[in-house]
Each structure stands twice: as structure tokens, then as C-alpha cells.
Image (cartoon, coloured by chain):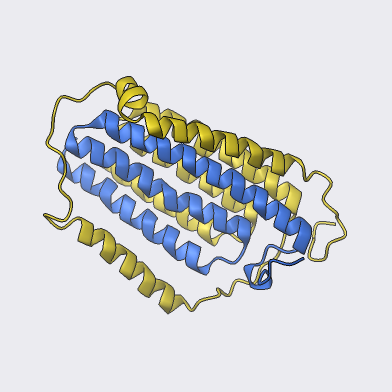
Chain colours: A blue, B yellow
């Protein structure tokens, strides 16, 4: 793989990171926020694999990327579980109305 | 081949933007699955087929199923599209975040270890990164508890205000 193809993936990492941060800042729905959080983690996985490829240490990059994928999935599961509980107890998923921890 | 790389990158960015902009939560989850699938193709092209397979099955499969399940439990909810913080401030914060990333790329900021003969993935996972593996096991157990939390809410009270699909 030549260097220009790696540049394409590096630009992809930066673009996905930008989209993820922007979405996280402007989103108000709890479930939508978890969707955006998933988008934000994708460039981290891609960056680990890319760095492993660039350094010639594919297996180390893959090992770290696997750890990130597991952590990302667990964050999604716990976040969705919390969102369902919040919807059950407060009747809304809008962050603007979730300004208290008391039912 | 270069055209395919660009197409995959552009497709991934379009899917991510659509997932962020989608009004319906189910649509956002499906666009997210598309993003995960295209990212897994990119990972495969970078020479990491094991991670690509895991990303495709977990990111595009399992997580999408979980999203659909949670959306079915919570129901549709119209959310005001106005963000809590002003959008110019969001762009300033993005610029700061990208600036921090760019700082890390400056020469001399991070010193990488010298290249050596790389052990196999199995040796790295079960030998060098053993703590990561234990951490993953703990995280998977907490994920099981999270799934129990999701499954334990089957009897959601449908009389809550804001539920529009009744």
C-alpha cells in the first residue's frame, strides 16, 4: 500500500473524529448520543490499526483495536440500558429535561 | 485500487453524517451499521483481517440489534433539534480537539519504541497485553449486567407522556 492510500485513511480518521465530536456536542437525545459515541470510537479503532500498519507492528495495533472494540460495545450496552431506565423513570430522553437525578 | 480507498472513505463519512443527522432513531442506528461495515472494510484493507471480522460482527451486527431492541423499548420520541450549546462554540471545541491531536503528531512529542521483531497476535494478547485481556473479561461481565438491565425493563409503563407510538 502506497503512502497516498494511507493518507486517505488518515483523513478519514480526522473526519470521523470531527463528526463524532460535533454530534456529541449538539445531540440532545440520549440514545442518539450513544449512536454518536459509537461514531466517535470508530476513528480510534482505525487509528490503532493504521499506526500498527505504519510502524510495522500489525499485531500490536490489532490487539489494542480489539480492546477498544470490546470497551466500545460494553459502553453501548450500559449506555442503552441506562437510557431505557431513564426513559422508564423520567418519561423522556431529552437531556434538557433531565436536569435532576431525583425522580 | 486508490479509487476504492477514496470511495470507502467517502461512503464512511456520508454514513456517519447521516447517522448524526437522522431524525428517526432507527434510521440513525442503520446508518451507524453502515458506518461500522465500511470501517471494517477499511481495517481489512489495512492488513488486520481479525479486527475487521470482529468489528463487522460486533459493530455492525450486535450493536445494531441492541439499538433496535432499546429503541423498541423506549419508543419514538420527538426531540427539539436545537442543541444545548451554540453551534459556533461546538466548532471552536472541535478545532481545539483537532489542535490537540495535531500537537501529538509533532516530531519529538511522542517517542515511539524502536522497531523489533514482532511476536504473533496470540503471544501479544495472552502474554504482553494480559492485563488488557483481564480488563476485557471484567468489561464483558459488566456488559452482561447491562443486558440484564435492558431485558429487565420489558414491562415499561406505556402511560408515560411523550410516547408517540401509542
Q: Nearer the viewer, residue B102 or B144?
A: B144
Task: Where is residue A38? Give x, y as percent.
Answer: 49, 49
**Residue B109: x percent and y percent?**
16, 56
B138 and A94: which one is in front?
A: B138
Towards the viewer: B68 or B38: B68
- Pick the quarter of the image with the N terminus of chain B: top left
The answer to whether residue B109 is seen in the rendering is yes
Residue at left offset 43%, top offset 72% = B90
Residue B146 placement (x, y as % from top left): 64, 42
Tell me if residue B11 can be seen.
Answer: no
Identify the residue at horizontal 43%, vertical 49% (top origin).
Answer: A41
Rendered residue at 23%/22% (across/down): B119
Viewed as shown, does residue B84 lie left or right of B37? right
In this rendering, the count of numbered labels is 0
Task: Determine the residue positioned at 66% across, 52% down.
Answer: A82
Residue B114 image offset from top left, x and y in percent: 12, 36
Residue A68, image quadrant: top left
Image height of B26 relative to B55, above or below? below
Specify the quadrant that holds the C terminus of chain B. Answer: bottom right
Q: Nearer the viewer, residue B112 or B6?
A: B112
Left or right: where does residue A89 sit relative to residue A57? right
Q: Is residue A48 above or below residue B20?
A: above
In the shown orientation, is residue B152 left or right of residue B38? Answer: right
Amino acid at each position: 500500500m502506497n503512502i497516498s492510500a494511507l493518507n486517505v485513511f488518515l483523513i478519514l480518521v480526522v473526519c470521523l473524529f470531527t463528526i463524532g465530536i460535533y454530534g456529541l456536542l449538539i445531540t440532545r437525545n440520549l440514545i442518539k448520543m450513544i449512536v454518536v459515541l459509537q461514531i466517535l470510537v470508530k476513528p480510534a479503532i482505525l487509528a490503532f490499526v493504521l499506526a500498527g500498519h505504519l510502524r510495522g507492528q500489525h499485531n500490536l495495533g490489532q490487539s489494542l483495536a480489539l480492546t477498544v472494540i470490546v470497551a466500545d460495545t460494553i459502553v453501548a450496552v450500559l449506555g442503552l440500558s441506562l437510557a431505557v431506565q431513564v426513559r422508564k423513570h423520567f418519561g423522556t430522553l431529552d437531556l434538557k429535561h433531565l436536569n435532576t437525578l431525583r425522580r | 485500487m486508490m479509487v476504492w480507498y477514496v470511495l470507502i472513505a467517502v461512503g464512511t463519512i456520508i454514513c456517519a453524517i447521516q447517522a448524526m443527522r437522522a431524525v428517526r432513531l432507527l434510521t440513525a442506528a442503520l446508518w451507524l451499521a453502515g458506518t461500522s461495515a465500511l470501517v471494517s472494510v477499511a481495517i481489512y484493507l489495512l492488513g488486520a483481517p481479525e479486527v475487521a471480522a470482529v468489528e463487522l460482527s460486533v459493530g455492525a451486527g450486535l450493536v445494531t440489534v441492541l439499538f433496535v431492541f432499546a429503541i423498541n423499548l423506549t419508543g419514538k420520541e420527538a426531540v427539539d433539534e436545537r442543541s444545548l450549546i451554540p453551534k459556533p462554540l461546538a466548532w471552536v471545541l472541535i478545532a481545539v480537539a483537532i489542535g490537540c491531536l495535531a500537537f501529538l503528531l509533532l516530531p519529538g512529542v511522542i517517542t515511539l519504541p524502536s522497531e523489533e521483531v514482532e511476536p504473533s497476535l496470540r503471544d501479544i494478547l495472552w502474554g504482553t497485553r494480559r492485563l488488557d485481556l483481564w480488563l476485557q473479561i471484567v468489561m464483558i461481565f459488566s456488559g452482561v449486567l447491562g443486558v440484564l438491565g435492558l431485558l429487565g425493563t420489558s414491562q415499561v409503563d406505556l402511560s408515560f407522556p411523550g410516547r408517540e407510538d401509542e
